């Protein structure tokens, strides 16, 4: 499914709305060009999940675990921008955290799919003449997502 996100607040709200569907072990792969809104969307996920912030663009830290403040899953926020390959992601040794968390990987395409066979692929694309808005498209991979009605939660 895809949606238009008119501004930054809409991107965050989409993340917060999606968070209501998420549970421990879920993997989200975020793609989109530099500045597409991946961190903004993750901030919304964090708000929706009720995890401790702030969710920021990592400087040196590639993976950050945000603990739940509401007894739900933690949020494991990974930025794979500086990583070259799936092997680099594997070297982070995220598996034990990922089992108990919702894992979100910015720049994860081609690098993080091996973390879970089932995943949600989220693509953010600048739209409009000057890229003043975004479109978001979500692709559901695997049986975990097969029965989930994203339209109902996000539209
Ligand atoms: N729907 C939207 N419409 C217009 N601007 C938006 C929208 N969503 C986010 N933005 C803006 O896009 C900019 C970049 O956002 P953000 O840092 O989340 O992108 P990113 O994809 O994480 O970037 P990077 O590639 O550096 O990790 C911010 O200034 C944010 O306000
Ligand atoms: Mg970012």
Image (cartoon, helix red, strand yellow):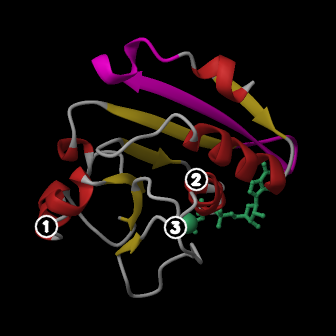
The residue to which callout 2 is attached is 45
The mark found on residue 19 in the picture is: none
Q: How far apart are marks 2 and 1 (CA)?
A: 23 Å
The local secondary structure at tag 2 comes to helix
Q: In this view, does 148 lie to the left or right of 111?
A: right
Residue 3 in the image: x percent, y percent? 73, 28
The residue to which callout 3 is attached is 69
Q: Is residue 115 left or right of residue 91?
A: right
Residue 147 in the image: x percent, y percent? 43, 11
Q: Quadrant of residue 83?
A: bottom left
Q: Which of 99 and 131 is in front in this view?
A: 99
Q: Residue at x 57, y 72 (%)?
A: 55
Q: Which of 148 and 89 is in front in this view?
A: 148
Mark 2 CB near ligand 1 (8 Å cut):
no
Magenta span covers which residues?
A: 126-148
Q: In which quarter of the image is the N terminus?
A: top right
Nearer the observer: mark 2 or 3; the answer is 3
Residue lying furthest front in this view? 71
Residue 54 in the image: x percent, y percent? 59, 78
For label 1, the crowd category at 10 Å Cα-Cα, with few meaning under 14, some 14 to 19 and many 20 or more, is: few
Q: Do the residues labelled 1 and 3 touch (CB within 8 Å)?
A: no
Mark toward the start of the polypeptide (2 vs 1):
2
The local secondary structure at tag 1 comes to loop
The residue to which callout 1 is attached is 93
Q: How far apart are marks 1 and 3 (CA)?
A: 24 Å
| Residue 134 forms part of the magenta stretch | yes
For label 3, the crowd category at 10 Å Cα-Cα, with few meaning under 14, some 14 to 19 and many 20 or more, is: few
Mark toward the start of the polypeptide (1 vs 3):
3
């Amino acid at each position: 499914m895809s949606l238009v996100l008119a501004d930054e607040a809409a991107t965050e709200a989409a993340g917060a709305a999606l968070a209501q569907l998420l549970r421990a072990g879920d993997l989200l792969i975020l793609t989109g060009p530099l500045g597409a809104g991946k961190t903004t969307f993750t901030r919304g996920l964090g708000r929706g999940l009720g995890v401790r912030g702030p969710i920021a663009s990592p400087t040196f830290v590639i993976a950050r675990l945000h603990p739940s403040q509401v007894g739900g899953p933690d949020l494991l926020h990974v930025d794979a921008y500086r990583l070259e390959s799936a092997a680099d992601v594997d070297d982070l040794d995220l598996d034990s955290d990922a089992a108990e968390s919702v894992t979100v990987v910015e720049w994860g395409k081609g690098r993080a799919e091996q973390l879970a066979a089932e995943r949600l692929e989220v693509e953010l694309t600048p739209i409009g003449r000057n890229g003043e808005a975004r479109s978001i498209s979500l692709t559901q991979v695997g049986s975990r997502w097969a029965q989930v009605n994203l339209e109902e939660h996000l539209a």
